[in-house]
Each structure stands twice: as C-alpha cells, then as structure tokens.
Image (tube, helix red, strand yellow):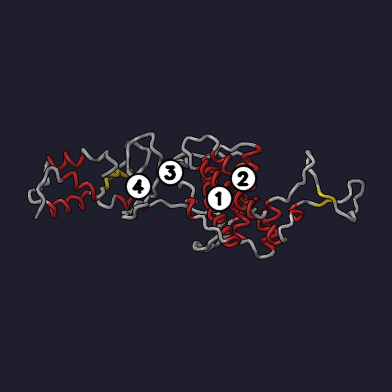
Amino acid sequence: MKARFQELTDRAIAAMLAAIEVYNKPNFPYRAESFAALAVNAWELLLKAKWLVEHNNKLSCLYIQEGSPQSDKPARRPRIKKSRSGNPITHSADYLAKKLSEKGMLDEAARKNLEGMIELRHSVIHFYNRSPQFVQRLHELGAACVKNFAAAIKDWFNRDLAEFKFFLMPLSFVELPDSTEAIVLNTHEKNFLAFIDALEPKTSDPSSRYSVTVNVEIRFTKSKAKDALAVQVTDDPNAPAVRLTEEQIRERYPWDYARLTEECRRRYTDFKVNREYHTRRKALLDDNRFCHVRELDPGNPKSAKKAFFNPNILQEFDKYYQRKS
C-alpha cells in the first residue's frame, strides 16, 4: 500500500498530464481555462505531498485549524475547519507554497509563478477573458508552470517525468495577436497583466531550473534526430499557424535577388539572366517554401516590396538548367 504522499504525487502527475493534454488539443474552445484549473490543482496536490513528508505523513497537518465558533479567543483544543458537507478543509496551494518557500524548500520563482497561475485561475473561472494578449501571457505562465513542476517533483521525490513528454505545444496552437491590430483590454485584463509583470524579476537567469514565465521560440533547423519534430511549410489554411520573427525569417530566406542570381551562375552551365529566368523566378514568388516577399509598409498594397529566397529554390531551377559537374 502506498503512503499518502505517494498517492498525492501520482495524482499530481495525472492532473498535470490532463492539463497539458487539454492545452495541446487543437480547436478546443475552453483550453486556457481548463489548463489553468488543472495545472493549479496539480501543484496543490504536489505541495500537499511535500507538506506530508515534512510532517511525518500525518494527514492532520493539511487541515485548517480554527478556534471555538462561540468566542474570538483561541480554543484550548483547536477545531478542524469543516466544509458545508462536513469534510475537513485543507490548506490552499498559496498557503503551502508560501510556507515551503519560507523554509527554503521551494524556489521563489516557482512560488511567484504559482501565484500568477492561481490569479489566472481565479480570473478565468470567475469571469472570462477575450484578449489575445491574455492568451499569450497564459502560454508564458503555463510553460514555466510545467517546467517548474517537473523540476520540483524531481528535487523532492526524485521522479523523472521525461517519459511523459512534459511540454506545452509552443505557439502552434496559440492564437497570438496580429502586430497591426489594436488590442483593447478590459479593466480585469489590464489588472491581471500588470500583476504578472510585477511578479517577474527585472533580471533572471535563463538557465535556471525555475522561472516565473518562459518565452518559447521556434526555429527551423535541420536535424537527423529520429525524434525531431517535423515541420513543413504549407498553404493549408487549416494547418496550425507558426509565426516567425523578422530574424527567423531572414534565417530561413537568406538570399536576395542578387545572391540568387549569383548562385545560379555558379551552379549551372547554361544559365542566362533573361526573360525565361525571370519568368521562372517570378512564378515561385507566391510559394512560401521558396520565397518570402517583405513589404516596407505591411498591409499597404502600394508598399515597396523585396523578395528573399530559401536556398531550396535551386531544386526548382534544376528542372530547367544543366548543373555543373
């Protein structure tokens, strides 16, 4: 028979797995709200497991004690506070995190992250939030929440969660705000985002095992690893969206017209800069596998434009020109 703290640890893992599974589902309308509730529940169970270990597995250490209801004075024998159904009320995740942090058993960044997650849970359960910026902040909080959970359970109980693939699907299923759109935040959303900003330290170590929030960056890189995530550029409107930074776009499309033309001269014996070349090149401008057209003034149809090319475009020109031996 397992000890109580072991049962709580198993349930904590199950709750976090459920939170991650819900969050990573595509086209799931209540994703953010469900993740927040389940992730906080997972942390509360884990904190209670740790609290039990520190108190010799005595279940009474988890119960809230109160004085006599007929007097403001402390009772000689404190009573256990009961719920409406008559069951004992246990300490909250917030309380246990604070106590463990004071004892040096819980990293302060992890405690602040959990504080933010609890506030997020209150916000989404008791009301609703519609801002894309709010969703983005949830992803940053949630990624750190999962990371901290895996680190804490390893530190406290030597449980390695690598087998469960603990991660939130980064950006692919998160609807981020368009940079050209104005985002109108209501008062509740403004207050919450300000609260999260206040939790974050001015300086932090990116290599630390615990974080308040985490920024996840996607890069397209070549990999021979068998378990590498396969990514393919597609025009399918139903495919999950991945947004790249300007720097990442330049990494993927490093050649301008002059560089592409020079590479063609080096590669082919019969290459000429003529009408046929321009026709073939222009036919590929709308194919984002090979080309990205950058607008000086995005959204303005009359804006000046410049095309940048992925080196893979040469595979298309191989169909028309003779390669040098």
Q: CA distance from mark 4 to mark 3?
A: 13 Å
Residue highlighted by disc 1: 141
What's the residue type where badge 1 is placed? Leu
- The image quadrant where one finds the C terminus is bottom left
257 left or right, relative to 150 = left
What's the residue type where badge 3 is placed? Ser
Mark 1 neighbour density, 10 Å: few (under 14) some (14–19) many (20 or more): many
What's the residue type where badge 4 is placed? Ala
In the rendered image, residue 84, in percent from the top left (x then y), is placed at 79, 39
In the rendered image, residue 250, in percent from the top left (x then y), is placed at 32, 52
Mark 3 neighbour density, 10 Å: few (under 14) some (14–19) many (20 or more): some
Residue at 16% from the left image edge and 53% from the top image edge: 262
Mark 2 neighbour density, 10 Å: few (under 14) some (14–19) many (20 or more): many
Proximity of marks 4 and 1: CB atoms separated by less than 8 Å: no
Q: CA distance from mark 3 to mark 2?
A: 22 Å
The residue closer to the viewer here, 240 or 307, is 240
SS label for mark 2: helix
Q: Quadrant of residue 49?
A: bottom right
SS label for mark 3: loop
Q: Earlier in the sequence, mark 3 or mark 2?
A: 2
Residue at 49% from the left image edge and 48% from the top image edge: 168
Residue highlighted by disc 4: 230
SS label for mark 4: loop
Residue highlighted by disc 2: 120
Residue highlighted by disc 3: 172
What's the residue type where badge 2 is placed? Leu
In the rendered image, residue 195, in percent from the top left (x then y), is placed at 62, 50
SS label for mark 1: helix
